[in-house]
Image (cartoon, grey):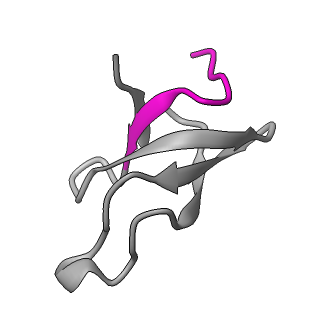
Amino acid sequence: MKYEIGMKVSFGRPNGEKTEGIITKINPKSLKVRTLESRGRAGRSVQGTVWKVPRDERYTKVIQ
């Protein structure tokens, strides 16, 4: 899959919680994604937090 900075994606473990975010940086094996919503039980990770996400279609899906 070809990823671009600014793309809206959904990320998370295959059987776990999914979170929407925007790609801010692209590395050879991973992506940096800024969240658009809080993540985790009781919202422990607030909106706008940057996560390192594997460049793998099992963990990251592009949202139209």
Please, is residue 14 above or below residue 52 in the view?
Answer: above
> 52 or 22, which lies in front?
22
Q: Is 19 one of the magenta-colored residues?
A: no
Residue 1 position in % (x across, y down)? 57, 16
| Residue 9 shown left or right of residue 18 in the figure | right
Residue 18 position in % (x across, y down)? 27, 51
Snapshot quadrant of residue 24: top right
Name the residue at 26% across, 78% down. 43
Snapshot quadrant of residue 45: bottom left
Name the residue at 43% across, 34% down. 9
| Residue 54 shown left or right of residue 16 in the figure | right
Specify start and end residues of the magenta stretch as a single range. Answer: 1-11
Please, is residue 41 above or below residue 50 in the view?
Answer: below
Name the residue at 57% across, 49% down. 33
| Residue 43 shown left or right of residue 60 in the figure | left
> 14 or 38, which lies in front?
38
Helix, strand or loop: magenta stretch: loop
> 26 or 24, which lies in front?
24
Residue 45 visible in the displayed image: yes
Residue 48 position in % (x across, y down)? 49, 62
Number of marks: 0
Residue 31 position in % (x across, y down)? 65, 44
Please, is residue 55 above or below residue 36 in the view?
Answer: above
Name the residue at 29% across, 47% down. 14
